[in-house]
């Protein structure tokens, strides 16, 4: 797209990002930004963009609770019928009872069930659960606290920070809870089990901010005795949870205790154990992690360097010479991943 009016072909993700920049950073209305996009792209892309942002206009085109719950199923997010936040099915032992279709949802709704949940990690999602203090012992204002955390973090990129400029209206997809809290939705496809262990952060919870990943989260469209969970935005386009943001929200990993290392048995008595040289660590990582994503390879390799007592500078030097680092689109994330291990 150009300001001169000519049409430049781009994909829907680039177009949506341009729309988000205009409405969030440029403070333009949805209508003005959409009109601009209509004039500077193809009719097909403009129509796709309009379909994505239409759910944001909740006052113009209100969605029924059934429509919102069905939107989860359309994204292959399985729902768990619940009451008072307790599941009504043993979904871990009987996964076949999870709700996967509109007909299945209708059957439970006809039985009077109005509350449903989902497990974010099963669908590569991460939810930030923010409370405002009502009904909580610490009375902390989670919304004010997360805005303060984001504003004060120099490592977080401008793209993420823009989502919090006029928070929560500037956030692409969130649920308002009956108590006035918020659920912020993120894509999080790279989270490893080691990283997930760091989500239990008592200092963060004292601010009434909680990360929901492996725990059941109430879906928008649900209703409890306290009120309804209302979605603003759409599940179609969720922001990616970055390591920069995650490192602001979670505790640093605990350093493993020093332990005696025993050399690997070998027929060559002069051969060194793999974890005594950087080259040996890279070779071991290639053997163990070559089938993983670039991010997982880098994250796990950094752990090997840290546990071997190597310095961060050595780890960074050798990891940045791997094909996994060279193959990343955003190479700054490699430094961020290594920093998260050596904090």
Image: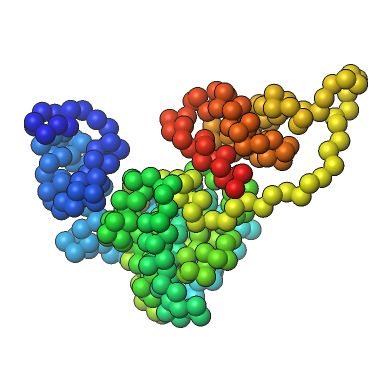
Whether residue 66 is visible, yes or no, is: no
Q: Could you say where residue 180 lies in the image, as x and y percent from the top left?
A: 36, 73
Q: Could you say where residue 209 lies in the image, as x and y percent from the top left?
A: 47, 65
On screen, residue 315 versus residue 49, left or right, reads right
| Of the pair 56 and 116, the residue shown nearer to us | 56
Which residue lies at the image location 55% right of the left edge and 61% below the top edge? Answer: 215
On screen, residue 212 versus residue 194, left or right, reads left
Tell me how many marks there are.
0
Whether residue 6 is visible, yes or no, is: yes
Q: Could you say where residue 303 lies in the image, as x and y percent from the top left?
A: 66, 40
Which residue lies at the image location 24% right of the left edge and 51% below the top edge? Answer: 24
Establish if 279 lies above or below 292: above
Which residue lies at the image location 58% right of the left edge and 66% below the top edge? Answer: 202
Q: Quadrant of the N terminus?
A: top left
| Of the pair 109 and 289, the residue shown nearer to us | 289
Q: Quadrant of residue 110?
A: bottom left
Most extreme residue toward the left is 4
Which residue lies at the image location 64% right of the left edge and 58% below the top edge? Answer: 93
Q: Could you say where residue 51 lies in the image, as x and y percent from the top left?
A: 23, 47
């Amino acid at each position: 797209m150009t300001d001169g009016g000519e049409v430049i072909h781009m994909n829907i993700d680039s177009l949506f990002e341009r729309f988000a920049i205009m409405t969030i950073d440029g403070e333009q209305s949805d209508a003005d930004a959409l009109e601009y996009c209509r004039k500077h792209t193809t009719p097909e892309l403009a129509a796709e963009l309009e379909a994505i942002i239409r759910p944001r206009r909740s006052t113009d085109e209100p969605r029924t609770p059934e429509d919102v719950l069905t939107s989860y199923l359309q994204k292959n997010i399985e729902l768990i019928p619940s009451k008072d936040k307790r599941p009504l099915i043993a979904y871990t032992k009987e996964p076949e009872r999870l709700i996967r279709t509109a007909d299945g949802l209708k059957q439970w709704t006809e039985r009077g069930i109005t509350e449903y949940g989902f497990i974010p990690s099963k669908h590569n999602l991460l939810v930030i659960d923010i409370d405002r203090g009502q009904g909580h012992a610490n009375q902390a204002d989670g919304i004010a606290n997360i805005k303060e955390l984001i504003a004060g973090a120099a490592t977080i990129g401008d793209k993420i920070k823009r989502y919090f400029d006029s928070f929560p209206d500037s956030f692409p997809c969130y649920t308002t809870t009956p108590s006035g809290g918020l659920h912020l939705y993120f894509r999080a496809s790279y989270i490893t089990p080691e990283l997930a262990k760091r989500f239990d952060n008592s200092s963060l919870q004292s601010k009434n901010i909680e990360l929901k990943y492996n725990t059941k989260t109430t879906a928008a469209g649900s209703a409890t005795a306290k009120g309804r969970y209302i979605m603003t935005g759409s599940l179609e386009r969720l922001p990616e949870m970055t390591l920069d943001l995650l490192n602001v929200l979670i505790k640093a990993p605990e350093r493993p205790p020093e332990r005696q290392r025993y050399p690997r048995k070998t027929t060559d008595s002069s051969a060194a154990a793999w974890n005594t040289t950087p080259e040996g660590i890279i070779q071991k990582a290639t053997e163990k992690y070559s089938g993983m994503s670039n991010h997982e390879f880098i994250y796990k390799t950094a752990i090997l360097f840290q546990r071997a007592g190597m310095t961060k500078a050595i780890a960074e030097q050798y990891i940045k010479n791997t094909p996994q680092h060279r193959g990343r689109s955003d190479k700054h994330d490699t430094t961020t991943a290594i920093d998260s291990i050596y904090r």
